[in-house]
Image (cartoon, grey):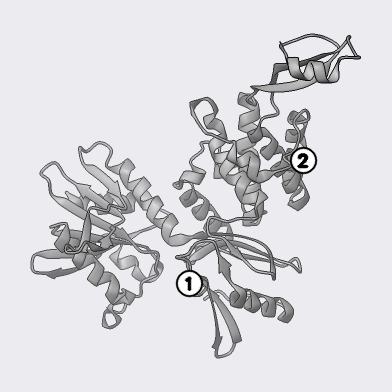
Amino acid sequence: MIVKTLPSDTFDNLKLFIEEFNTEMHEADALDFMRVGYKRNYGDVITIRNYVGLIQMNDGTQIEVLPKLSFEGEYETIAKQVFIKMLRSLKEFSGKVFNSASLNVDRMNLYEIFISMYIQEVRHLVKTGIKSFYETKEDNLKVYKGKLKVKEQQRYNNVHKERFFVAYDEYTTNRPENRLIKSTLLKLQKLSNYIENVKEIQNLLNSFELIEPSTNFDSDFSKVTINRGNKEYETIMIWSKVFLYNRSFTTFSGSTTARALLFPMEKIFESYVASELKKHLRDKDWSISTQDKGFYLFDEPSKFSLRPDIVITKENDETIILDTKWKILIDDERKNYGVSQADMYQMYAYAKKYESKKVFVIYPLNPEMSKYAIDGIEFRSEGISVQLLFIDLLNVDDSLKYITDKMI
């Protein structure tokens, strides 16, 4: 267990945050994220679980939460590298520019890393060209252009015959997406404490010099429509909303925190495994679906939907179920290796409903379970096999080779 000591005032504020917990995601629970308890030799402790990210307290304290895995060497640097690599499997991080190789992860906290990634994406946009569009404007001008507005002309220019009240189209970069990007850059320029990020933001702001900052975020975001013509803005808009609204992919808020950027590791691990597995199986004519909604636990009435993380259908119509669990198992058979009994009931229900004889549960590998890295752990009943398999996050390709070999 990794233990960090906080000043008493900060610790008390963090406890208050848990009590005040409020979320925009109805399925989220404060106790899934943080628990207050007591441990011998330590005293009062707050245990953080299931989420990874950064909490910024109002007193300036930054609490960085990293994946709870054992790595040899510089733990924090490696953990951040692995985490960012996994994040790229999410839609929000699918842009090619989100490249962790160019990030100084050992010198930046997660928030600065996300700022740097946002900068990379905007830099790529500037390089390919900031989008412009035709905006209809109305004005009382000394020169005639566009279309004369007859009623307005009569109303305003009966005396000023030298003027023309006209409507015309102007080709401008001052579109909602660009206004939101400029507002985001201006905000991040104030928030960032990493000098390289600040310099990069200043350089980018020069490219947005003729663009006004957004004065109404809600209005401008409502006007943004992503299509083939502005696909480059998709990832940037997602992240602009995160930064401008102080939101997270799971939003936690409270009076004790300035901002919190938190990610549910269950979702990230599931997305990462599915993404990497598809790469390993791309040369096979197998159908792969994620979060399948094909069956209910009860048919009449249809209640309690079953949603295995990954469903694979082979050429011979054999169905294989894979579920991912972000949990550190223990090498103790008497304690069922730390596997949840409810999870095993769930796997058995998947096998029955999908008529699958093979169900795999994928866990992250940790040193204690390293002897199971290749063969895993198997449970059998009534012709159904449920196998616990492991992915070494530092050697994913080999782990997936072992897993895919078991499917053949």
* x and y percentages locating residue 293 in the rendered image: 27, 53
Residue 33: x and y in percent read 51, 70
Q: Which amino acid, mark 1? A: Asp
In this rendering, is residue 167 above or below 317?
Answer: above
Residue at horizontal 25 percent and vertical 68 percent from the top? 346
Disc 1 is placed on an element classified as helix
Q: Is residue 129 left or right of residue 153?
A: left
- Amino acid type of the residue tagged 2 in the rendering: Lys
| Count of marks, rendered view | 2
User: Disc 2 on helix, strand or loop?
Assistant: helix
Q: Is residue 7 visible?
A: yes
For disc 2, the marked residue is 199
Residue drawn at (65%, 47%) of the image: 115
Q: In the rendered image of this protein, does residue 75 appear above or below residue 207? A: below
Residue hosting label 1: 32
* Residue at 64% across, 45% down: 218
Q: Where is residue 64? Give x, y as percent.
A: 62, 64
Q: Which tag is nearer the camera, tag 2 or tag 1?
A: 1
- Of residues 42 and 359, which is closer to you in this image? 359
One can see residue 393 in this view = no
Whether residue 56 is situated above or below residue 177 in the rendered picture: below
Left or right: 212 as drawn, with respect to 326: right
Report how far apart the C-alphas of labels 2 and 1 lie in the structure.
38 Å
Residue at far left of view: 382
